[in-house]
Structures are given as structure tokens and as C-alpha cells.
């Protein structure tokens, strides 16, 4: 029997991936909310969705469905709202007897995870998060390869992610530290989660540069040293990317060898949803390590460029 979904943040960039996942897993979207009403995308996936621009009315509608014990009572709430609202919307899901499927970052601060775990223990529902790189076939294969390698092998890793954003980015909630958590949280968290999933827990972290448009540093993991660099400034794109008119450059190298995982991204949210529906979704405990790390990065005082800095920082990008 199909499950009923509600969705927060229907007009946002990431919402279509969740709409697609809900539809492709054979489920139904019954309600959605967003303060902005540019949500015609809903019709591409579902034809009979109750839409609200005020959260209070959305809340009342979902609560009524629950109390009426209707066949439309919500089983899952998909959370695609701005980062600073994720915590409140996950609490809402539990309160109406549903489970949450929340975009990254699940929350902004480690203590928010603690509070949600307490609420989860008192509730019927569960809180799941979208760590989509963990279900990427090429990265699953890489993890198995690393597991079979010599134990305690230490790897040298470089993470580079440059994704061009115009002036709108810093004006929007994404450019506000208290709402997005900053670049390391908003665009880096799933890469940091991936690296810890592959190489183990954090031993040491240092931030070398932190500005509104670029951040970089060094992380010592159990089995790897990671030089990382994130930027939204197109001027920082490598020359080959600029020559091709390529707005995004993503690279992870392990011991000098590039990891190729640029393909296969279109269905990752659907795979995450399948795991949730099968009872194998990514939990609060799965989300915690990367939230702890990006919180420490956000609050660290940059120490300046040194020998452990990413090559782009050493070369003055």
C-alpha cells in the first residue's frame, strides 16, 4: 500500500529530486508548503496536492488528516526547506505521527541531534537524512576496495569542489551563516560525510581560509589526511574548466588517483528513499559525525596557509 507524504520547501532547488523519489517509489504526495508560490513543478509529479504558503495552515491540514484517521494521513514528511528550519520541521513530522526524510544538513549544531534523538525515542516516527553519496554504486565499490586493502593504510586525499554562484547566493539565506551554516555546511557536508564513511573518524581538523565565498583546510582522519577546498567563486575554477565554460569543478583524489563518480547522480534520492522505506535509512547517528565536523569548521579561527593546505590555497586561488 502506498505511503502518504507531505513536503516542506516545495519551491526550492532540491524539491524536484524528492518529488521524483516519492513518485518513483510508488507513493503519494498529499500536501506541500512553501512561502513562495512558484510551485508549478508539483503538477509534473502529482495532480492533487494541497498546497499552502503558510506553515500554520499546512500544520493544521496535516494534523486534521491524522486525527480523522483518514486514508490520507501523512506517513512521511520530506524536508527540503532552508537549513535552519530542518530541526523544526523534523520535530513537526514526529509530532504528527510521521517519519522525516530530511535533506542535508539534517541540523546545524550537534546539540540539535541530541534533542531530536530524545524526541524520536518518545515518538512513533523516525528521522532519516539524505546522505546520497553513500548509495552511489561507484563509491560503494570504492569503499569495499578500501576495506579489502591493507589495514591501517594511510591515504593522501584532496577534495576540491568549486560551484559557481552569482551575487544572489550571498543575499539569500544560503549566504547567511546563521541560516545555512556557511559553505562547509551547505555545500560541503555530504563530501565530509563521504570521506569519514570511507576513511574513519576525525582525529584533527584545521581551517586555513574562511571567507563568505571560499573555505579550505586540513582534516586528519583515521586512515587519511585530507586537504580540502570549497568555493562558490567562478574565478577559482581551474583554467580547463573555465575554457570549457564549465560552471562546476568537483574532484576527489586518493593517493593522486582521481575518483570518478560524476555519473549516476540522477537516481540517488530515489535509492535513499528505497532504503528508508525498507527500514534501512540513514539515521541521526549516521548524520552526527559530519554535523560535528562542520560545526567545528564554522567556529574555527583560520590559521593561514601552510604545508598541509590544499594546492589551490598554496597557489593563491
Image (cartoon, rainbow, N blue to C red):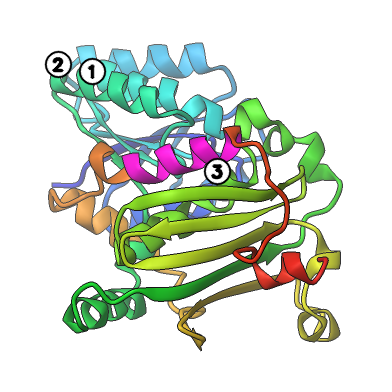
Q: Residues within 10 Å of mark 2 (few under 14, many from 20)?
A: few
- Mark 1 or 3, closer to the camera: 3
Q: Is 124 drawn above or below residue 101 in the view shown?
A: above
Residue tagged 2: 122
Residue 119's label in the rendered image is: 1
166 relative position to 275: left or right = right
Residue at 39% across, 29% down: 110
Query: Can the viewer see residue 177 in this picture?
Result: yes
As drawn, the residue found furthest toward the front would be: 307
Q: Position of residue 151 (x, y in %)?
A: 18, 76
- Per the rendered image, the range of residues in magenta is 288-298
Tag 1 secondary structure: helix
User: Which of the two discs, 3 and 2, sits closer to the camera?
Assistant: 3
Q: How far apart are marks 1 and 3 (CA)?
A: 24 Å
Residue at the spot of label 3: 185
Please tell me which of labels 3 and 2 falls first in the chain: 2
Total tally of numbered discs in the picture:
3
**Could you give the CA–CA distance between mark 3 and mark 2, rounded to whole angstroms?**
29 Å
Q: Main secondary structure of the magenta part?
A: helix
Counting residues from the N terminus, which is met first, the one under dot 1 or under dot 3?
A: 1
Amino acid at each position: 500500500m502506498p505511503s502518504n507524504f507531505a513536503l516542506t520547501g516545495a519551491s526550492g532547488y532540491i524539491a524536484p529530486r524528492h518529488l521524483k523519489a516519492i513518485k518513483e517509489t510508488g507513493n503519494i504526495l498529499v500536501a506541500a508548503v512553501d512561502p513562495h508560490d512558484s510551485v508549478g513543478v508539483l503538477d509534473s509529479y502529482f495532480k492533487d496536492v494541497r498546497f499552502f504558503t503558510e506553515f500554520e495552515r499546512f500544520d493544521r491540514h496535516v494534523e486534521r488528516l491524522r486525527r480523522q484517521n483518514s486514508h490520507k494521513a501523512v506517513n512521511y514528511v520530506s524536508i527540503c526547506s532552508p537549513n535552519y528550519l530542518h530541526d523544526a520541521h523534523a520535530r513537526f513530522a514526529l509530532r504528527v505521527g510521521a517519519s522525516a526524510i530530511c535533506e542535508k544538513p539534517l541540523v546545524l549544531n550537534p546539540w540539535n541531534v541530541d534533542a531530536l534523538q530524545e524526541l524520536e525515542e518518545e515518538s512513533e516516527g523516525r528521522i532519516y537524512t539524505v546522505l546520497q553519496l553513500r548509495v552511489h554504486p561507484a563509491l560503494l565499490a570504492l569503499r569495499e576496495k578500501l576495506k579489502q586493502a591493507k589495514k591501517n593504510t594511510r591515504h593522501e586525499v584532496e577534495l576540491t569542489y568549486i560551484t559557481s554562484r552569482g551575487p544572489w547566493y550571498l543575499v539569500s539565506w544560503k549566504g547567511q551563516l546563521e541560516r545555512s551554516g556557511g559553505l562547509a555546511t551547505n555545500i560541503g557536508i555530504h563530501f565530509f560525510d563521504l570521506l569519514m564513511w570511507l576513511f574513519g573518524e576525525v582525529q584533527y581538523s584545521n581551517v586555513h581560509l574562511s571567507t563568505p565565498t571560499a573555505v579550505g583546510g586540513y582534516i586528519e582522519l583515521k586512515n587519511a589526511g585530507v586537504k580540502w577546498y570549497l568555493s562558490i567563486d567562478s574565478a577559482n575554477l581551474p583554467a580547463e574548466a573555465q575554457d570549457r565554460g564549465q560552471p562546476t569543478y568537483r574532484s576527489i583524489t586518493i593517493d593522486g588517483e582521481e575518483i570518478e563518480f560524476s555519473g549516476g547522480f540522477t537516481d540517488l534520492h530515489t535509492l535513499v528513499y528505497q532504503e528508508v522505506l525498507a527500514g534501512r535509512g540513514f539515521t541521526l547517528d549516521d548524520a552526527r559525525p559530519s554535523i560535528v565536523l562542520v560545526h567545528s569548521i564554522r567556529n574555527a579561527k583560520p590559521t593561514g596557509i601552510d604545508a598541509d593546505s590544499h594546492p589551490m590555497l598554496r597557489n593563491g586561488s
